[in-house]
Amino acid sequence: MSLTAVLSRIDADVPQALDRLFELLRIPSISTDPAFRTACDRAADWLVKDLESIGIAAEKRVTPGHPMVVGHADGSGPHLLFYGHYDVQPVDPLELWDNDPFDPKLEDTAKGRVLRGRGTADDKGQLMTFIEACRAWKAEQGTLPCKITIFLEGEEESGSPSLVPFMEAHKDELRADLALICDTAMFESKTPAIVTMLRGMLQEEITITGPDKDLHSGYYGGIAINPIRVLSQIIATLHDETGRVTIPGFYDGVPELSDQMQAQWDALGFDHAAFLRDVDLSVPAGEQDRTPLEMTWSRPTCEVNGIWGGYTGEGFKTVLPAQAHAKISFRLVGDQDPLKIREALRGMITKMLPADCSVAFTAHGASKACVIDADDPRFEKALQALSEEWQVPAAYIGGGGSIPVAGYFQDILGTTPLLIGFGKDDDALHSPNEKYDLESFHKGMRSWARILAALT
Ligand code: BES
Ligand code: ZN
């Protein structure tokens, strides 16, 4: 049978697939840092060439930011749109990496073989699982089992600023019967899963300014306002003592979980103690009246991602800083409106400013949450294919992260997104020593081969 041949081809070609992935991983495509702009461009070029090597007509498409890569391959059957992102997160703190983040290695660990390096799991390793599955189909059958459009972005990790205009301008080219996204994880590292819910995102940068320059804290300390104190006070009021966010109107559009979804999640038996133990924690610290799974999947959050100002170098400097800065982001759910929340946040902060202080806001990414109706026979087929490959029943789960494109597929293209990824909880996404299990890569390729067959 043809699928069997494709799976065997994948098994036989793992070393070559790893070589290809490692080439891509060596390109430091950090999208948020302008210093890596040409690297992002090179990653896009590499992908175009790789897609062309399997007969997928691909192009690098310019945007005001980093380029998109779009490829088309004809085939019979339904039209599938595959999305992945070739950009990666910054690598700091670099000193916590055991190896060069952009010199990927295959490593033996107590839990099995892993690919180590920035982008192995998020998202280059994952996106290559799909491309390799296409390569194997093409090699064995001479053609793909479906009509396929490949759509790769280079700005996902920095809020996808070019994505909406690009999609609006190329709606007709991108619209498909079903969109596949490989940028998520399995449930508790062992159960393959389809993600049916992703949180949205709002990012805001805040700068509070007091005096016109950094001052001697002996001359001015006491009489002069300190912007770091002002900022700290503001940040401290963003949550109440139960963990709820205090921004006016923040919870507008936050739905309660349906009984059906609640039952489905309860049945998963999430081991939150183990999840926290993995990162040296023990107590769920979110809204105290919510379950741990709700905290990570279906409740909105407000997190301070960074805060700086004054003197933070070696030794000590008795300075009274002129400015204090913070980067604050929100995970959104249901129908929460990121732009309304941005306005409410700005209003609240402006109101709290004491005399002589000013505030400047810089807007970063904003995207709504995405809820996907899994009541679709194609989802059942994919779930079945996953279960067969991994030899355990696959599950429908939520996802705490954000993948803005999933919502845009729904709203701009009217195309349903099917989110399947093979990441594991201990992959250290966005952290030092990011890894992707060899098992995820190998079974990921095999899973896509099966899913393609199941969707024809
Ligand atoms: N791959 C992640 C999203 C993800 C993480 C999904 C964990 C499921 C589980 C993605 O690349 C990511 O990190 N996205 C950013 C988007 C943000 C910058 C808009 C995120 O979630 O922080
Ligand atoms: Zn990702």
Image (cartoon, helix red, strand yellow):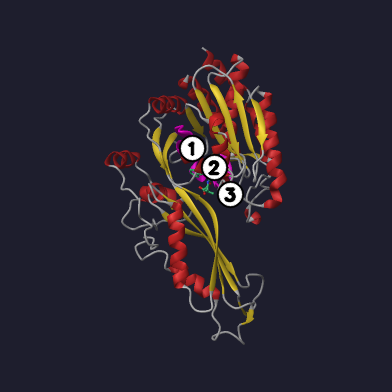
Residue, far front: 169
The answer to whether the beta carbon of the residue marked 3 is less than 8 Å from any atom of ligand 1 is: yes
x, y percent for residue 199: 44, 47
Closer mark to the observer between disc 2 and disc 3: 2
| Tag count | 3
Q: Which of the 4 image quadrants contains residue 121? A: top right
Q: In the image, 157: left or right of 334?
A: right
Contact flag, marks 1 and 3 (Cβ < 8 Å): no
Contact flag, marks 1 and 2 (Cβ < 8 Å): yes
Residue 412: give its label.
1
x, y percent for residue 262: 30, 42
The residue at the point 57 percent across, 84 percent down is 221
The residue at the point 60 percent across, 32 percent down is 128
Q: How crowded is mark 3: few (under 14 residues within 10 Å), some or many (20 or more)?
A: some
Closer mark to the observer between disc 1 and disc 3: 1
Magenta residues? 409-437
Q: Which amino acid does label 1 sit on?
A: Ile
Whether residue 63 is visible:
yes
User: Mark 2 or mark 1, which is nearer the start of the sequence?
Assistant: 2
Task: Write down the residue under mark 2.
Answer: 164
Label 1, label 2: how many angstroms apart (C-alpha)? 8 Å
Is residue 226 rendered magenta in the image? no
Task: Write down the residue under mark 3.
Answer: 158
Q: Which amino acid does label 3 sit on?
A: Ser
In the image, residue 349 sits, relative to residue 146, either above or below, namely below
Q: How crowded is mark 1: few (under 14 residues within 10 Å), some or many (20 or more)?
A: some
